[in-house]
Amino acid sequence: MTELSVSVTAHDREGGPCTVIRLVGEADVSTRAMAEVFDAEVAKHPRLLVVDLSELSFIDSSALRVIMVTHRALDHDGSALALVSPSPAVARILEFIDIAHTIPVYASLAEATAG
């Protein structure tokens, strides 16, 4: 199993700054760092939090739960969450659970951050 790597960067966009969390590897029940990073970023009250899934090869229900909890917390705060560039394997899972009905999924970071 490939370990999950999580990185956070700030980006400027037309509507103001946004935060990007990039997930690389496999996000599963053993990846506590993911929840810790997401919680820390939500506490900063970003206007837009973007999760880059382009290099994520696997995601399980526990990681999806972190994303859903994050979405609810941001929505409650008047902020937004967007998912971008899911890898083919992750895209299949997201389509299966119809996450786009709840959280927008974009093809690119530029598309997600267009003001």
Image (tube, rainbow, N blue to C red):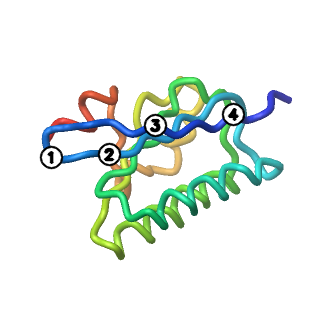
| Residue 99 percent across, percent down from the top left | 44, 51
Disc 2 secondary structure class? strand
Query: Callout 3, which amino acid?
Result: Thr
State which tag comes first along the sequence, 4 or 1. 4
Disc 1 secondary structure class? loop
Of 29 and 102, the residue lying toward us: 29
Q: Is residue 55 left or right of residue 99?
A: right
State which tag comes first along the sequence, 3 or 1. 3
Point 46% across, 37% down: residue: 9
Mark drawn on residue 15 = 1
> How far apart are the alpha carbons under marks 4 and 2?
20 Å
Q: Is residue 51 left or right of residue 33?
A: left
On the question of residue 95 being in view, the answer is: no
Q: Is residue 106 left or right of residue 1?
A: left
Closer to the camera: disc 4 or disc 3? 3
On the question of residue 100 being in view, the answer is: yes
Query: Callout 2, which amino acid?
Result: Cys
Of 35 and 91, the residue lying toward us: 35
> How far apart are the alpha carbons under marks 1 and 2?
9 Å
Disc 3 secondary structure class? strand
Query: Callout 4, which amino acid?
Result: Ser
> Is disc 1 in contact with disc 2, using a CB cutoff of under 8 Å?
no
Of 82 and 93, the residue lying toward us: 82
Where is 35 relative to 8, above or below?
Answer: below
State which tag comes first along the sequence, 4 or 2. 4
Mark drawn on residue 9 = 3
Residue placed under numbered mark 2 in the picture: 18
Residue placed under numbered mark 4 in the picture: 5
Where is 5 relative to 18, above or below?
Answer: above
Query: Callout 1, which amino acid?
Result: Gly
